[in-house]
Image: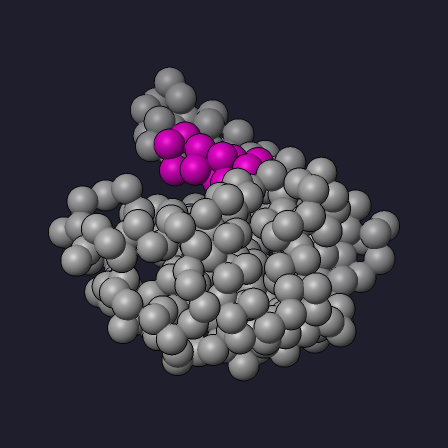
Amino acid sequence: MRFKLTLLFGSLTVLILLPLPFVFPLSGNPGSDAVAAVGRFHILILHFPIALLLIVPLLELLSRFTTLNNLREANLVILFLCLLFGITTCIFGYALALGDGGAGELLQTHMQNEITATVLMALTLILKVLHLDRPCHGSGVLYLSALLLSISVLVAGSHHGASMVHGEDYLYAKLPTAFQNLFNTELPKPADITADASAYEAVIQPIFERNCYFCHSAAMEMGGFRMDVFERLMAGGDGGMPGIEPGSLQGSEVHYRITLDPSSNAFMPPNGRPPLTDEETALVSWWIASGASPTASISELDPPPAALTERLSGQR
């Protein structure tokens, strides 16, 4: 009876989660505030399935001791709670993406990993019940294999989730360069800032990369807006206003957003992230007002702000 109920619960997990990306595709357009409000509880519960699943192998090891073999049954309860929280986390996370207009490669990968991990949790629970009810060497190997696979996929998905919040290099950004190369063999090399350097590539693009790419790049296309491709940067997103209007600060949504009062809901970067520095804002304004060329050198544009002039003078 226990096995049949577990099998039914596992099947419902698959039927609920696997169709989500097809029934509710992520378009990148913000949804209703009600959906977004529900989705934001994703942040509160996402740690529960991670913590619970990591406890399971520890209890499995402890249960090898004769005096602690009752932990095998306790693991069944933990796996059930883990699956329950996993399903809830996936649903709330999907609501968050739908409500806030999330899209992009990194979000898709994160979503796929977490749904896969939750389905694997259901399989792990089924195999655990099977192993307890009909213990044999084969059932134990299958159960432990499913458990380890669930943990691996969940850890990968959690890393992708953290990358969306903190940046793709968050895990290794503070490591020595030699260790960073183990994770990323194509670390960007900043262009030298000289008078002949492209103002966009040497000065402006690095500012956008540091402050904006976590929400507006191939990894994450919030509001249908990407800033890592020049043409998409100029065109803007779902708001209808050009991202950059060459020569017009008032007509450029990027400038409008970064110069708002930080308390405004439309201010960028959002969610309490550090705003652009005064120097960075001045450089972006200078570039837009000078025509927002993707190729023009610094010397070809209007006289740059004092901070950039000082950096150029220091390299002579």
In which image quadrant can residue 198 be found? bottom left
Q: Main secondary structure of the magenta part?
A: helix
Can you see residue 168? yes
Whole-percent x and y of residue 149?
40, 55
Q: Residue at x 76, y 62 (%)?
A: 30
Along the line of sight, which residue is nearer the eye, 115 or 265? Answer: 265
The C terminus lies in quadrant: bottom left
Give the residues in magenta.
47-59
Whole-percent x and y of residue 175?
23, 43
**69 is within the stretch colored magenta:** no
Q: Which residue in the rendered view is the most extreme toward the top?
A: 67
Q: In the displayed structure, does residue 90 sit left or right of residue 208?
A: right
125 in relation to 185, above or below: above
Q: In the displayed structure, does residue 282 sit left or right of residue 173?
A: right
196 in relation to 216, above or below: below
Can you see residue 8? no
Whole-percent x and y of residue 28?
68, 69
User: Total of numbered circles in the picture?
Assistant: 0
182 in relation to 27, above or below: above
Q: Which residue in the rendered view is the most extreme toward the left?
A: 178
Along the line of sight, which residue is nearer the eye, 159 or 315? Answer: 315
Q: Residue at x 50, y 44 (%)?
A: 278
**57 is within the stretch colored magenta:** yes
Q: Residue at x 56, y 64 (%)?
A: 216
Q: Residue at x 42, y 60 (%)?
A: 304
In which image quadrant can residue 312 be found? bottom left
Whole-percent x and y of residue 72?
46, 33
Along the line of sight, which residue is nearer the eye, 303 or 159? Answer: 303
